[in-house]
Image (tube, rainbow, N blue to C red):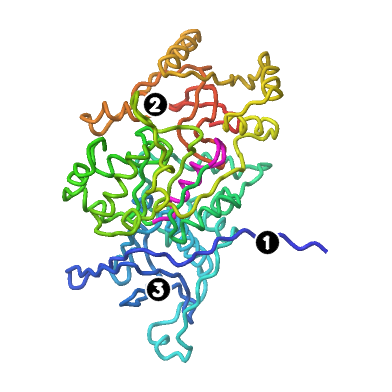
Amino acid sequence: METPEKEPQVSVPPLQCTVTVERTQQGRPHCSTHKGVRLMLGRNAFRDMILRMEGPRHSLQWSLDKFRLHTRFLKEGKATISLQDTNTNLMMSNAPPHQLLVFLKVLAGKKAVAAEGTAGTAKALTARQRLLSDRPVAFEEISPLTLKEYKGARKREGRPPLKEVNGQKQQQQPGASPLSSKRKMQDSPGRKSKVSRFFNPTLLTAEQRKVVQAVSSGQSVFFTGSAGTGKSFLLQRLVGSLPPESTFITASTGVAASHIGGCTLHAFAGVGTGEGSLEQCLRLASRKAVAQQWRQCRHLIVDEVSMVDGLFFEKLEAVARSVRKNDKPFGGIQLILCGDFLQLPPVTKRGEQRVFCFQTPAWERCVTCTLELTDVKRQDDPEFIEILQAVRLGRCSEAAAEKLQQTVNNCVERDGIKASRLCTHRDDVDHINSVHLNDLSGQERVFVSVDSDLEQQGVLDANTPVGRRLVLKVGCQVMLTKNLEVGRGLVNGARGVVTAFTHGNTVMHTMCCDK
């Protein structure tokens, strides 16, 4: 006898964050801020949805009968629940962005389902009836949001839960893409419905889960792996699971920092180039604004750490302990380091000694957990993966060399997408791309970036992987330089070809999908 497949569902764990409660009484706002509290969704004895806040000093709860969600700054770990009956705003901040998204989606989905279920039913109990009721005071954690409930909530006038609450349409953000045409395609007969990525996210491998567990336990972690093992994807997941106000995202170079939405390690540290003496670095880091940033930091993420000079890392560790007045390794900051020492070495001047971070005593003191990702996701040919891993270690056997030599005349073009050609210098890349673009017939389409700060335009151009001016034609080869949708294969390095220009948008075909 076969066991029926369990319906996908999403549970909502307690949300750790800061809550500012704003009440309006007699036209005057009254605010109180509660840091380090836990928010939980549940139901009382009357099956009303309740939001409970538990903190070291206060425990409060509110009935979620009529409310609106404000999620404009969701990616920054901020959101507001406006309780309309009591003129109260619950302003959440410093919440892990991914956990906040799950929390609000379950909240909105449950409310939408409740609104559907109560339509046309008996009138709710009055306040007097509730007071006179002999039902015991209770708080039961809310049940997981099922896929059936989620789909039902989305069908309400074709809006997803976070776009509409209590039957009141929220105004669509200017410039947002319309949803109607896509929805009509999904609802057309014969079209296979897809499970929402909210219920079917890209799952972590066992190795990636170990990294997440180590970070969650507070250890300073260094995780590494060869190309294609999901280091960038995992780093994004870790960023979404940490509180934004005390988490600083950095990388060894400006280009790497732009990929993860952070700044360079030098910019965070505030020590200039870091080439001065330790005393000079301490003076620079002791400036009021810089020192405040150091003291605020509890989690420091460093991508491409292999390019950080070991002597500079030693200085930073000493600066952290001094500025934060904390003798623990790196001043008590949790380090989350990512990179591959077999790919990119530290950048040094000619004649200078090259010292890797892991060769320093500071590394031994600070990094308590080292994990390696070995499950390659970018390739699926075991033999090719084995050759790549050997080359990564500087080993290329005669058999591997012969195997590679046999592919010289292979035609790898597929669906108009040609093989990538690797060059050692960017000037060579630009020249080859220009020659191939000029060989294509058809009209050029020019896309120019718009920079909010014109004074920093040169800095942005130098530290981003794409130039300020992009010229395309139908038939030209393109490559993504940033992860867009990992689950669909639209990742950094994905190749494609431009097939059309429609309504100001560029349509391209990739190996995994049309975009």
Q: Residue at x 56, y 49 (%)?
A: 197
The one nearer the camera, 45 or 483, is: 483
CA separation in Å, label 1 and label 3: 29 Å
Quarter of the image containing the N terminus? bottom right
Instruction: Give the left or right position of residue 349, taking residue 134 as reference.
Output: left
Mark sitting earlier along the chain (1/2): 1
Query: Residue 50's spot in the image, x, y percent?
Result: 43, 73
The one nearer the camera, 41 or 390, is: 390
Q: Residues within 10 Å of mark 3 (few under 14, many from 20)?
A: some
In the displayed structure, 39 sits above or below 213; it is below
Instruction: Give the left or right position of residue 284, taking residue 133 as reference.
Output: left
Q: Secondary structure at mark 1?
A: loop
Query: What span is colored magenta in the figure?
Result: 225-242
| Image disc number at residue 466 | 2
Mark 3, residue position: 52
Please say whether residue 106 is one of the residues in the magenta stretch.
Answer: no
Query: Residue 338's spot in the image, x, y percent?
Result: 45, 43
Q: Nearer the viewer, mark 3 or mark 2?
A: 2
Quarter where residue 81 is shown: bottom left
Q: Residues within 10 Å of mark 1 (few under 14, many from 20)?
A: few
Number of marks in the rendered image: 3
The one nearer the camera, 346 or 78, is: 346
Mark sitting earlier along the chain (1/3): 1
Q: Residues within 10 Å of mark 2 (few under 14, many from 20)?
A: some
Q: Residue at x 33, y 45 (%)?
A: 314
Query: Residue 289's spot in the image, x, y percent?
Result: 19, 49
Please, what is the three-letter code of the amino acid marked with disc 3?
Arg
| Image disc number at residue 6 | 1
Please, what is the three-letter code of the amino acid marked with disc 2?
Val
CA separation in Å, label 1 and label 2: 45 Å
Q: Residue at x 55, y 35 (%)?
A: 227
CA separation in Å, label 3 and label 2: 47 Å
